[in-house]
């Protein structure tokens, strides 16, 4: 081969490999800031900083004795009026505090998908389900972008103090919509950012307006209602069209 052409030939061969290794452009949906809340991850979605995920090491906090009095989950379940035989996905179920309460509301014919991205949390979930002899809760190991529930399977997907920690909120909601039946509900339970008296770190709160803003990019969802039932949290409901 001509010595002058050899470098050009080698460059042509290497070009595809170099292109594969080139850094991907940042996702325009997200913004990263050097200055941010120390309880957040420095990544922002539609103006809101994403909070740090609670690790399985802090699971005892989910089962704290005072939680029922603080959050009144009895009122939450009453407000949502779960039906016998319903299929519910508890997204970010943790140790199963909410899952086991929902399991009683939907009865033996119903199913709760306990979804987590940490296997350690799922191990705790199933340990507690065995302890309480609950058989209608199924564990699912999801990812940060997909809960991995069966397509069009769920009547309700609920997130209790969870959505604000999603690393990829847009992608996760897209996947959740795919897992909902037509007319199914997505329920956000989030500490009220509008209320400075709620004793939770700011990055772990969400306003009703912010939730609506972030759901506005999903045309398949329609805002249904906000239930003013709980002492510290919003219950914000969207339905799949």
Image: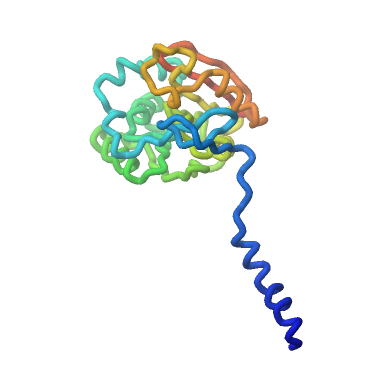
> Can you say which quadrant of the picture contains the N terminus?
bottom right
Which residue is at the far front? 4
Q: Nearer the viewer, residue 143 or 224?
A: 143
Report the side of 12 relative to 151 (left or right). Answer: right
> Can you say which quadrant of the picture contains the C terminus?
top right
How far across and down, in percent of the image, does residue 199 sit?
36, 17
State whether residue 20 appears in this view.
Answer: yes
State whether residue 86 appears in this view.
Answer: no
**Location of residue 68 (image quadrant):** top left
How far across and down, in percent of the image, does residue 181 sit?
57, 33
Q: Nearer the viewer, residue 108 or 129?
A: 129
Instruction: Relative to 73, say whether 130 is above or below.
Output: below
How far across and down, in percent of the image, does residue 193 sit?
47, 18
Q: Nearer the viewer, residue 67 or 105?
A: 67
Report the side of 94 relative to 157 (left or right). Answer: left
Q: How many numbered circles does the render carry?
A: 0
């Amino acid at each position: 081969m001509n010595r002058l052409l050899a470098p050009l030939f080698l460059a042509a061969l290497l070009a595809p490999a170099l292109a594969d290794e080139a850094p991907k452009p940042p996702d325009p949906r997200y913004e990263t800031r050097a200055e941010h809340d120390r309880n957040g991850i420095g990544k922002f979605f539609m103006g809101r900083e994403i909070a740090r995920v609670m690790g399985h090491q802090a699971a005892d906090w989910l089962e704290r004795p005072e939680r029922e009095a603080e959050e009144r989950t009895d009122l939450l379940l009453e407000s949502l009026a779960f039906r016998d035989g319903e299929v519910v996905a508890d997204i970010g179920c943790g140790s199963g505090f909410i899952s086991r309460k929902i399991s009683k509301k939907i009865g033996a014919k119903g199913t709760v998908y306990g979804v987590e991205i940490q296997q350690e949390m799922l191990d705790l979930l199933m340990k507690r389900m065995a302890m309480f002899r609950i058989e209608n809760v199924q564990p699912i190991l999801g990812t940060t972008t997909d809960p991995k529930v069966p397509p069009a399977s769920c009547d309700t997907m609920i997130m209790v103090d969870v959505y604000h920690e999603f690393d990829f909120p847009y992608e996760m909601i897209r996947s959740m919509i795919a897992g909902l039946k037509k007319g199914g509900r997505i329920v956000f339970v989030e500490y009220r950012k509008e209320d400075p008296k709620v004793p939770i770190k700011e990055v772990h709160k969400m306003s009703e307006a912010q939730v609506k803003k972030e759901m506005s990019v999903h045309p398949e969802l329609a805002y249904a209602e906000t239930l003013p039932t709980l002492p510290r949290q919003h219950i914000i409901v969207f339905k799949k069209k």
